[in-house]
Image (cartoon, coloured by chain):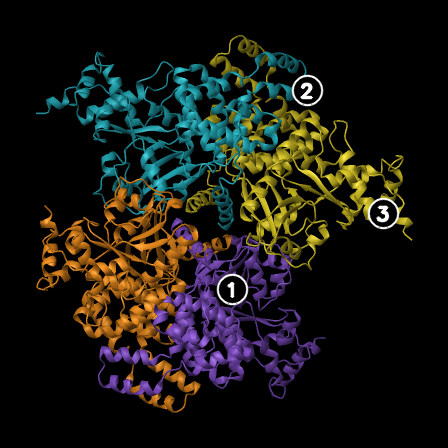
Chain colours: A purple, B orange, C yellow, D cyan
Amino acid sequence: MQRNRFLSDILSTLFDRSSNLPKTQDARDIYALCRALLSEEGEVSGQKLAATVLARYRGLSDAHKLAFFQFLNDELDIDAAALAPLTTEYAAKPSVAGFKRLSHAAEPKRQELLRRLNQPVGATEELVSMRVDLLELVRDNPELARTDLDFVHLLRSWFNRGFLVLKQINWDTPARLLDKIVAYEAVHEIDDWDDLRRRLYPPDRRCFAFFHPAMPDEPLIFVEVALTEAIASSVDDLLSDAREPLTAQQAKTAVFYSISNCQRGLKGISFGNLLIKQVVAELSLEYPNLTHFVTLSPIPGLNKWLATQTNDEAIGPAAQTMLEGTATAEQTRAMAARYLITAKRPDGKPVDPVARFHLGNGAEVHAVHANADSSPNGRAQSGGAMVNYLYDLSKTEHHHENFALRSVVAASRSTLALSTAPFTTKSKEMTP
Amino acid sequence: MQRNRFLSDILSTLFDRSSNLPKTQDARDIYALCRALLSEEGEVSGQKLAATVLARYRGLSDAHKLAFFQFLNDELDIDAAALAPLTTEYAAKPSVAGFKRLSHAAEPKRQELLRRLNQPVGATEELVSMRVDLLELVRDNPELARTDLDFVHLLRSWFNRGFLVLKQINWDTPARLLDKIVAYEAVHEIDDWDDLRRRLYPPDRRCFAFFHPAMPDEPLIFVEVALTEAIASSVDDLLSDAREPLTAQQAKTAVFYSISNCQRGLKGISFGNLLIKQVVAELSLEYPNLTHFVTLSPIPGLNKWLATQTNDEAIGPAAQTMLEGTATAEQTRAMAARYLITAKRPDGKPVDPVARFHLGNGAEVHAVHANADSSPNGRAQSGGAMVNYLYDLSKTEHHHENFALRSVVAASRSTLALSTAPFTTKSKEMTP
Amino acid sequence: MQRNRFLSDILSTLFDRSSNLPKTQDARDIYALCRALLSEEGEVSGQKLAATVLARYRGLSDAHKLAFFQFLNDELDIDAAALAPLTTEYAAKPSVAGFKRLSHAAEPKRQELLRRLNQPVGATEELVSMRVDLLELVRDNPELARTDLDFVHLLRSWFNRGFLVLKQINWDTPARLLDKIVAYEAVHEIDDWDDLRRRLYPPDRRCFAFFHPAMPDEPLIFVEVALTEAIASSVDDLLSDAREPLTAQQAKTAVFYSISNCQRGLKGISFGNLLIKQVVAELSLEYPNLTHFVTLSPIPGLNKWLATQTNDEAIGPAAQTMLEGTATAEQTRAMAARYLITAKRPDGKPVDPVARFHLGNGAEVHAVHANADSSPNGRAQSGGAMVNYLYDLSKTEHHHENFALRSVVAASRSTLALSTAPFTTKSKEMTP
Amino acid sequence: MQRNRFLSDILSTLFDRSSNLPKTQDARDIYALCRALLSEEGEVSGQKLAATVLARYRGLSDAHKLAFFQFLNDELDIDAAALAPLTTEYAAKPSVAGFKRLSHAAEPKRQELLRRLNQPVGATEELVSMRVDLLELVRDNPELARTDLDFVHLLRSWFNRGFLVLKQINWDTPARLLDKIVAYEAVHEIDDWDDLRRRLYPPDRRCFAFFHPAMPDEPLIFVEVALTEAIASSVDDLLSDAREPLTAQQAKTAVFYSISNCQRGLKGISFGNLLIKQVVAELSLEYPNLTHFVTLSPIPGLNKWLATQTNDEAIGPAAQTMLEGTATAEQTRAMAARYLITAKRPDGKPVDPVARFHLGNGAEVHAVHANADSSPNGRAQSGGAMVNYLYDLSKTEHHHENFALRSVVAASRSTLALSTAPFTTKSKEMTP
């Protein structure tokens, strides 16, 4: 343990001294500074130049930021004309020297710029923020997507799993970080401090987050977990403040009921699959009595889809009932199952984005529940229905491959049956 | 400070659990595993696959390692034939889609393989070791240098300054790490524990190292510093066990008397310039009374060069005297100055590698000393002569540029004068 | 710093393993166990016996707790009859052997019992809780005060300043501890998380607490500090959520606006004086620009005292006005000053308990303010008046001695003047 | 764990700021300062006064130290004359007020002085050093033993088990502390760094120490443990550098082969029994496969005792053989067993001090070994014989009580048999 303590010293040093480099006034504009950073000057004074560029960037107006990204996009692009002959040459003879020239020419100069910008302490976080700006600008300036591809390429390399750190968030976590958990929670909003305490303090609750050593104050993604006896069928019950907590030893099931990405600037760099599997591994190790790892997930696209099915012969009336909020629990479950398992996009993958995420990770649709989320949002998107995706690590590879290559949706027998059952549309009204 | 403590928790978590992933027996060979890692399967189970590949690699014989690198070199190379048309297309029309295709094709597949291998905890260190093997093999298989270029490309990105952590090594450092300092010291060998204590314990001694968060037990480079009153002219004096230590407050000068790179697998990724400047910044902040930052450096190429000068009219006799070990201090200093300032390679840069390093960092030749290193190695390489390079942070940029672009060697007026003074070759013998 | 890191390891070890002692069922009752603990058996198995006694105590009913304390009070009292001859003997001849016998006999056996009970990890906290029970019982069983004197004697020795640890509480503090700060705040109640953030997060707010290593989760006492430009005259302003924070560098004054003791079981063991002076020392060191250290304190006894003065010729009418809530600011200040400086107990010390505390520490009455605390409690106890006590470390010794030995109340010239000024009782009503 | 991290912050704070109290020049001599510390002045400025007294003490000559302790011994003694009537009074009527007066009078004033001296950071360590001086002076000034009794009384209370911290010492321990382990090792000297590494680094070696939070840099006592398969019979084997280490999982036995007290100033405050039992508990928890916990102990008094037995009819010749170094292994073992089990002091306890310690802790004599310690010291004191004491926590209480109250020496059947076997004195010579 002490071994890591040593590392912690290392890191305190790093963050205590964040600004001990000499500050100078450099009269050059941001373009000249970037060119200098890429030149000989950048070789020896790169850290200082990079800090100056980043400070200069922070002060830019929106219009100047656009201009800056256009500069990256055009002036620091691949020089394809220069690259072409090197390609031909290397195809003919794969020499080391040829490879070196080719490699160099094949990479847009902005990649090297971004790497050199990443030298000062704190720079990684600034580059992530810079990408938030870029994503904003790409909307109206789609050609900037080229530059964004390079951002993604580098960030993916820097936020490689091998560099991420899993950390438990609990009631011993500093308030500063808990404030961020509250702010970043994206699935089931955290009302106040008492609500947060209900999710972190009881012995049957867990929360885990990934961090990157270069951004120690910023969670990248976190998941909230409830340890339960049975597989949970309602988030209302999970978040209730009246319940009696279990000890961790009594629990049989770990329910992942909320996963939130925290960094818009890391969009497209996926941590969810890794986080879930790492947490499953951690919990398995710590509580060998846990037998099931499931999510309790929203079905965000259900009602939207139902609205497109109201003229369908088979399920139109049931869909209508559901949209009117008068469907029975049984109807709701049947419709949710049908939607999750049969509603597909043109590419064959499910319409539902949350389903795509978990099925893509190799999970399977385990069970659907009515009256599981009574929040306004839950009612509006899925009539209160929710779904458990089951993570069985011995099957995730198989499921993933079936899903990725053949679009097969893995599901429990009962949910499959439910998804194809004929509808007893009138059941609720008919009940005498 | 507590903020960083939180990070330290993060990191303890990381390293305490290094092996909590399910272990399976995978029957495939390393090539099939690498292909799987690059395929769909690698998307979802990359961490486990990568761990398996790395374990498999560790077990390979030397011959199989060569075959493995040849596989990387050839099968996972750039497909230049496929790249060529994409280049032309993009040159004609720089579309986003075209850029995406081009970028993807322009990168050797082995780069993506290496990134995916870097997912398990501890993988970075294993990839660095893998490169040690590769460098060995490149000697007899020069075509593997192509693969090595990709290693360098990725390692340079991952060991970016922004991710490095500066750490003081002192008498509160764990023994485990001190063992490594002893092992890695490359300039002035550390004899035993008492010698190490002399370099770390006294109040006027400092040692700093760079670490990477993914390799917390392994220093990347370290520098040993003596705080002194005057600019030190002899490493014998610095390392003497009879001296009386100063308080840090009494010191006027920081003498960098030993810099050692620790990781052969990071060859070509330069940390020395960054380390020296960061340590200068740290020490300046902590001890505002420090006025000079100098090295006390060996002159490894002096005698070798002198051996080529014995027929030179001007300095031949003096060179001879020196090689015979009978030169006076005055002669020795003059020859050392002349060598450092005037002996050049065809490209105009100094013959001496240590000189090239410090001058390339923007330092200047400050003073040369005779009888400064009486160790057998010191005698053999430079007749006991050593040199101070001066780091004046207000001038390093200027010096660096002059040196890099125009091969100008910055030197103090007195050393310059010494380097051009006519030799009084017989002085020693003549002294009555 | 690493040196302390090592200690932290030490301590983690301590608290991670809190319950690794073999648990056995011991059939003896708590009295037999206590006797065993004091006997030969306690010499070698004291830690286990003590844990058993403490566990047994926790399970006692109130009636049995009383019986237990009566056992301590009577059976484990000083044996004065046995002591008397030893006293005489030692008075005649102060031999070492005689001293040993005398010392042993002069200490009530319950002290040794308490020391032996303090062996298991966590025992100190349990003994502090035990004293909470005891204090409760002393009310109706005043003879138990003898046992309480021994508790105080030992706790004072164990909670010696040399063992206390000063710690800053801020927004990096774990939530678990912040919950306790909220619970223990005794002067200005903390409404909710936002109120807490206002007191801990801004750059011009500080909070410090004393801890004891054997009770690391429990603050003993804490003080809340506001850094301000001028000496604060209203806690309403200090706690307002609309104010603009200063940087710590802009501040000239540190205002101690709330001090709360946390442990009822440590009643009579005073930490306040030590805490204030240590915090003054810390802040002086960190912010050399701070020139004044003052409290902004309640005047809890003002209105109660005024109610006894309504028939007084000089101030009766003014007191009446004040109690009716119609006094002017000027009147309020005059009355507060008069109360603080002139209202004395029979022993010559001030009637006001807060005044006694700060004056006893060597502070002086610096200024009084009207409309400074508009909370219901503030209105009720002092008509909203508050007072600054000034801590000038160069004078505290002198003031303390004057106060302790001669009951002199140190006060600023202006407050002294105010305290003796004749009253313009009608001023408010007279204002046309 | 983070909970303890918080405490570590607490403690870093403590030790980083060790000298932030205002320093003043106080003209009074050490006696006047002590009196002031005990007076009203000490109530409010005790920490500063105490620091001044301690600084003054450090500067005293040996003669002045003696005078200082005589001052403590006489002027700050119990006033027995004043105490006598209070005793009588309390014997007559045990009132609270009477108890308070009695308690106060019954304690030597030097105890309160020592408590007040213990207020500055670092004071505890200084008081421990002060006692080293005192113990030195007691030799020639036996009356000072009275003062020493008060030192012991307070130190025993402050170094109560509940305040001690168990810490593993290993290869991740800072060099600064390892230097102390080398210095304090009292049983089997540590030759050099390699010897230390052999004791701390291998996976089958452990070392544990007790620390006190107020002296974090100073171990109080430490024990070195070897994990082995069989019960070790030779320390030569244990410390050999040629052996192949076990994994901790392979081990069946924990051998405590060296226990060293570190603080002369804590003489008479026993930590050994507590340390051994805590380490047994820790190791049992971590390695459930461990079945035996034994020492491998020296027999320091064997040869000395044999020298007194040369005229004894039964064992005289054998004793002679042994002292001449020509005894067989069998003879050596028999004599060692007889010595340990039968050689008694007038009070009935064993002559051997190490035996008294372990038997007093409730261990039993398990086995004796010849040729177990070939060091010069081992040869000289016991002809190379050593002994295993066995700690079976289920029996230690029983053994302890039998030993303490009835002087029964617990021993294994085989050792008992050996201790009473008739001697075959000539066996070695007779072997043809």
Label 2–label 3 contact, CB within 8 A: no
Tell us which disc is closer to us: 2 or 3: 3
Subunit bearing disc 1: A
Question: Front-most of A405 and D139?
Answer: D139
Subunit bearing disc 3: C
Q: Report the Cα–Cα distance between label 2 and label 3.
A: 48 Å
Tell us which disc is closer to us: 1 or 3: 3
Q: Amino acid at mark 1?
A: Phe
| Residue position for label 1 | A222
Q: In terms of secondary structure, where does tag 2 sit?
A: loop
Q: Amino acid at mark 3?
A: Gly
Residue D95 circle label: 2
Q: Report the Cα–Cα distance between label 1 and label 3.
A: 55 Å
Subunit bearing disc 2: D
| Residue position for label 3 | C325
Q: Please say if B83 is above or below B6.
A: below
Q: Report the Cα–Cα distance between label 1 and label 2.
A: 64 Å
Q: Are marks 1 and 3 on the same chain?
A: no
